[in-house]
Amino acid sequence: MALRGGALCPAYGLPNPLPSNRSRRNAGMRLVSSATATAAGRQKRPQNVGGEFFVDRRCIDCDTCRWMAPETFSRVDGMSAVTRQPSCEEERVKTLQALLSCPTSSIHTEKPTKEILKIQNMFPLPIDEKKLPGIYHCGYHSERSYGATSYLITHPEGNILVDSPRFTERLARNIERLGGVRFMFLTHKDDVGDHEKWSNRLKCDRILHSGDVEVSTANVEVQLHGEGPWFVGTDFELIHTPGHTEGSVCLYHKPLKVLFTGDHLARSEQSLLEICELYNKQSVSLQLRSVRKLLDIGFVWILPGHGRRIEFRDNQEKISALEAFLASKEPPCARH
């Protein structure tokens, strides 16, 4: 699979050998020790209800736990809190998945639990095996990416890692079991996180728009130039969507009609569609012009870096939602 409109990338390398069973056990026990804590060892938020799980004061209000385990977590006084303890096995699993994914390790159990070892092996987590086969949520959100979501796309011509999860050796091994990674697509400069560690470990080529290249990403293997579009093989289109940053790019998975938007567009707790105006590096008007570009793209799913997923019933519902959003944001003269 080659990048058209950009550079031809070298062939995907074979994954590194897996470590011994003993190393795996030791790594797992270290995580049990670090991912759980007694109430005395952390500054528990007073907004938590009593029980096994709690959130500490280091929460950065990234919303990850609230969309991963909405039955357990809510936003209270500007941060997440446990407002209801899990009441069944499914809720408990979701809560433990959120614990592992929290970028600041702010979610804890009152006592250590060995269940965390089972939860580790669930990631990357299938998003919807029937509707979105081969698309996974990596979990392990990174504080360096402000808690952004990272995804793995499996594909016969080579897998794609979308943005950077927090680097862990266990997740790297789990990704290798799914075929490794050929490309690491970085939607924009804010969500690059541990990109270099992942690139070195998985021997993958990174893709980032030149407008977002900084000192920490100066050695990425593929820099996109201009306004695109660019194509990765026949199934993936890269769409330049400046506004949040100069080099923001969305990835469109054509067969599954999924748009990976980074921080360009998402659903929030309060509204169907939202842009992060407060954190924009470019103008809002430029970003809205980039949103308007999407009217001609046939996606029916949005998988964002920050914010919540959206599934539209069909392309017409998507178009209606985008047009309504733009009408609420743009002055009348900009709609023509």
Image (tube, rainbow, N blue to C red):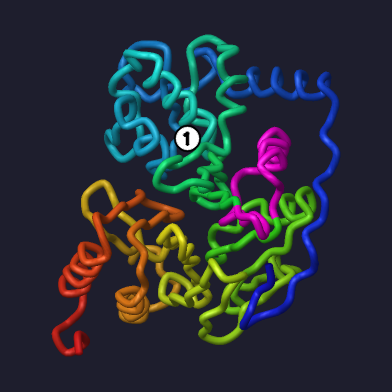
For mark 1, give the secondary structure.
loop
Residue pictured at 34% horizontal, 24% vertical = 82
Residue 199 appears at what percent x and percent y?
Answer: 74, 55
Please state if 67 lies on the left or on the right of 228 as rendered: left
Residue 291 occupies which quadrant of the picture?
Answer: bottom left
Residue pictured at 16% horizontal, 70% vertical = 328
Q: Is residue 272 above or below residue 22?
A: below
Work out whether residue 327 can be spotted.
Answer: yes
Q: Which one is nearer the viewer's eye here, 297 or 250?
A: 297
Q: Is residue 157 above or below residue 176?
A: below
Q: Quadrant of the C terminus?
A: bottom left
Residue 15 appears at what percent x and percent y?
Answer: 80, 46
Q: Is residue 124 above or below residue 256?
A: above
Work out whether residue 284 can be spotted.
Answer: no
Residue 332 appears at what percent x and percent y?
Answer: 14, 85
Please state if 93 lies on the left or on the right of 193 as rendered: left
- Magenta-drawn stretch contains 220: no
Q: Which one is nearer the viewer's eye here, 303 or 168?
A: 303
Q: Which one is nearer the viewer's eye here, 146 or 133?
A: 133
Please state if 312 lies on the left or on the right of 126 as rendered: left
Residue pictured at 38% horizontal, 25% vertical = 45
Residue 83 appears at what percent x and percent y?
Answer: 29, 23
Callout 1 amino acid:
Arg
Q: Which residues are magenta?
A: 155-181
Residue where numbered disc 1 is placed: 58
Residue pictured at 56% horizontal, 87% vertical = 226
Please state if 32 lies on the left or on the right of 314 as rendered: right
Total number of numbered discs in the rendering: 1
Residue 121 occupies which quadrant of the picture?
Answer: top right
Q: Residues within 10 Å of mark 1 (few under 14, many from 20)?
A: some
Q: Quadrant of the N terminus?
A: bottom right
